[in-house]
Amino acid sequence: MAAPNADHDDQDPPGEDDGPTADESSQNPPLDVDARWAEIVAELDEGSSTVTETPRPVPHEPPARGRGPAGTPVAPWVTPPGPRDWPASDEVEALEEEQSHFVPPTPPPITGRSPLLTLAWVLAVAGPAVFLLTAIFVRPFPTSVAQGCGVAFLAGIGLLLWRLPAHRDPEDDDPGAIV
């Protein structure tokens, strides 16, 4: 909420004194904005003469569209080289090639681990998959297939839960994942 104007002591109703009268306008000359602006600019120019300006580098002007660096015609889908596209030295190319040839280690074979773990995953995935395919393509749906898929799924999940470690290693202080 705005505070009342303390400088305004007279209680004239609004509308009676809505603007300057002819006498007041002759006393206050109109402001010359352009002259004042010129004064401000002149003051700023005077202050900047003490500062030494370093010459600014001329920006690289790209060649006209459709022209290469030498002014030769270029296909419209080819973009001209940018300011950071310079030819690399032999050392830089060798370093980039060395870094770009990462060969990940070969993963262990799926069946190379515990056969019981492989069986558990096959049962957990194949049970619902066979159930879904049978429900879509076979009419009437055999109840024995539904029961067999349910038993296979539950057996696979049960085996996976049974294979989980019962407790952590007491020497392992880090509760995070092992990478």
Image (cartoon, rainbow, N blue to C red):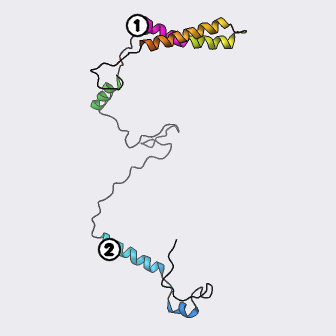
Residue appearing at x 65%, y 10% in the figure: 134
124 drawn magenta: yes
Residue extent of the magenta highlight:
105-125
Q: Residue furthest bottom?
A: 23
Figure check: 126 above or below 50? above
Residue appearing at x 39%, y 75% in the figure: 40
Secondary structure beneath label 1:
loop
Asked if residue 92 can be seen in this view, the reply is: yes
Q: Are marks 1 and 2 in contact (CB under 8 Å)?
A: no
Other-residue count near label 2 (Cα within 10 Å), few / some / many at <14 / 14–19 / ≥20: few
Which amino acid, mark 1?
Ser
Other-residue count near label 1 (Cα within 10 Å), few / some / many at <14 / 14–19 / ≥20: few
Using residue 161 as the reference point, say whether residue 14 is left or right of it: right
Instruction: In the rendered structure, find residue 114 and report the number of the disc placed on it.
Output: 1
Which amino acid, mark 2?
Glu
Figure check: 48 above or below 119? below
- Residue 99, quarter of the rendered image: top left
Asked if residue 179 can be seen in this view, the reply is: no
- Rendered-image quadrant of the C terminus: top left
For marks 1 and 2, give the CA distance: 86 Å
On the image, numbered disc 2 is attached to which residue? 46
Q: Residue furthest right?
A: 140
Q: Position of residue 31 (x, y in %)?
A: 49, 83
